[in-house]
């Protein structure tokens, strides 16, 4: 078959999808079910700018797939529309800090958004200090209220410098100001900031809870109406996808991806219905995909702890207990911490975290379902905490090794 014929076959092939883009994880619907309170809370914080006051800084926390980014972007887009109608001097810039992970990159992104007609060379090559002065100068000269939405804020490597400089810049601004909406999956990241930075924040905080099965079912029904042809998805498929996602993490993205993959499988089989069987078949690949996404979202030292667990798991021989039984793939918590300290030096990370922070990271990794821990019981000499990896050790090691090498 020629490529032209192959393209023609793909173009004319029937599909269960009406608009596949609307079942993609990045799509933001006009209505965000079960986030009315959170939308209202964000709105009340940023509404200070409507009265000529500087909004407080806001930190939004929650596990992946709980609607943090969608809610923040929705509110800010609506604020921009309202401010435009009322001719108010309010601007916002959304920045994904996974991509713009240094103060310099964040400031450069801000200026490119604020001065879109300026060529790149107008800002490239200058120091971070120059970019900072340019940004503050814009706010001062135009008396604008600028709100920076920093998604995955904890990925910024020199976060202390970024937060301290942007928040303290308001001391130089008689009118207008710069406020920060920080979004993070990591509830603990702020504790690692310098005390001087934390004292300058004056922030409010919000936590987005995971969705339950009933809420996920409603969210999926909404997406199905937009993304699939009428009656193309059986109710059992929606119920199963929402139940799986609620059981695993309460992550709406997991539920949505399950239906996306199930729809693709239905298309491949050339059937016009998505069933619970398609969802079951999609589960394994989606779970692995979600886990790997979660891995890349972890704070740097939490990634390093997980990498250490994966590397030790691949080397580990079964532990012999005093009763004569063997424990497969089990690690001692103390040995993991010691190896983590060595690994941090190997990859030239900053100083390893303390044993207290290490324990917090272990708790976080268990909450995400990546590891399971147990206290040692009868048959084991001494008292310790056992750690066992629940995901593919080689994949974890390969992904993070590549990321560390490119850092």
Image (cartoon, rainbow, N blue to C red):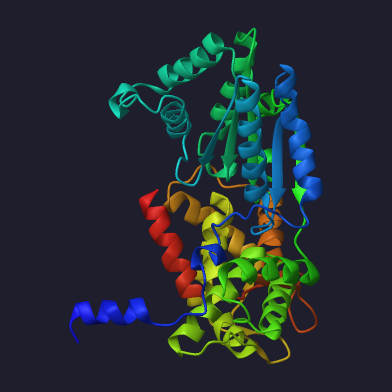
Picture residue at 41% right of the left edge, 17% below the top: 130
Q: Is residue 193 visible?
A: no
Q: Position of residue 391 (x, y in %)?
A: 57, 75
340 horizontally vs 8: left or right: right
Q: Is residue 333 above or below residue 144?
A: below
327 horizontally vs 272: left or right: right
Which image quarter: residue 256? bottom right
Picture residue at 78% right of the left edge, 66% below the top: 215
Q: Nearer the viewer, residue 230 or 401?
A: 230
Hey, which residue is sitting farthest left in the picture? 2
Q: Position of residue 301 (x, y in %)?
A: 56, 51
Which image quarter: residue 87? top right
Hey, which residue is sitting farthest top in the picture? 174
Q: Nearer the viewer, residue 343 or 286?
A: 286
Picture residue at 72% right of the left edge, 23% below the top: 50
Which image quarter: residue 63? bottom right
Q: Is residue 376 visible?
A: yes
Q: Position of residue 68 (x, y in %)?
A: 67, 49
162 horizontally vs 119: left or right: right
Q: Position of residue 290 (x, y in %)?
A: 56, 68
Picture residue at 59% right of the left edge, 75% below the top: 258
Count of numbered labels shown in the rendering: 0
Q: Is residue 240 above or below residue 125?
A: below
Q: Nearer the viewer, residue 1 or 203?
A: 1
Quadrant for the N terminus in the image: bottom left
């Amino acid at each position: 078959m020629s490529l032209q014929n192959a393209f023609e076959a793909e173009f004319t092939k029937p599909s269960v999808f009406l608009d596949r883009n609307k079942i993609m994880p990045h799509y933001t619907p006009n209505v965000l079910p079960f986030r009315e309170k959170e939308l209202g809370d964000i709105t009340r914080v940023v509404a200070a700018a409507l009265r000529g006051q500087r909004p407080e800084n806001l930190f939004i926390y929650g596990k992946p797939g709980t609607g943090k980014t969608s809610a923040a972007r929705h509110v800010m887009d609506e604020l921009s529309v309202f401010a435009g109608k009322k001719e108010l001097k309010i601007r916002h810039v959304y920045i994904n800090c996974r991509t713009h992970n240094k103060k310099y990159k964040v400031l450069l992104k801000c200026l490119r958004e604020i001065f879109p007609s300026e060529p790149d060379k107008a800002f490239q090559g200058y120091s971070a200090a120059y970019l900072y002065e340019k940004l503050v100068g814009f706010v001062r000269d135009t008396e604008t209220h600028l709100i920076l939405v920093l998604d995955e804020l904890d990925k910024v490597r020199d976060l202390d410098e970024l937060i301290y400089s942007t928040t303290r810049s308001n001391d130089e601004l008689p009118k207008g100001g710069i406020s920060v909406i920080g979004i993070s999956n990591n509830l603990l990241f702020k504790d690692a900031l310098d005390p001087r930075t934390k004292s300058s924040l004056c922030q409010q905080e919000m936590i987005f809870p995971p969705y339950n099965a009933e809420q996920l079912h409603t969210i999926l029904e909404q997406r199905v109406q937009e993304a699939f042809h009428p009656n193309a998805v059986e109710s059992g498929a929606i119920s199963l996808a929402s139940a799986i996602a609620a059981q695993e993490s309460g992550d709406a993205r997991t539920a949505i991806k399950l239906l996306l993959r199930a729809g693709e499988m239905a298309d491949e089989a050339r059937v016009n219905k998505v069933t619970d069987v398609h969802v079951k078949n999609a589960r394994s690949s989606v779970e692995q995909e979600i886990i790997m996404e979660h891995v890349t979202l972890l704070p740097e030292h939490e990634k390093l702890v997980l990498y250490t667990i994966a590397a030790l798991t691949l080397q580990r021989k079964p532990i012999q207990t005093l009763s004569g039984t063997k424990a497969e793939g089990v690690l001692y918590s103390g040995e993991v911490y010691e190896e983590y300290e060595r690994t941090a030096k190997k990859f030239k990370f900053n100083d390893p975290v303390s044993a207290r922070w290490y324990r917090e990271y272990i708790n976080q990794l268990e909450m995400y379902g990546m590891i399971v821990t147990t206290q040692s019981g009868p048959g084991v000499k001494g008292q310790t905490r056992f750690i066992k990896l629940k995901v593919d050790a080689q994949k974890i090691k390969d992904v993070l090794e590549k990321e560390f090498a490119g850092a």
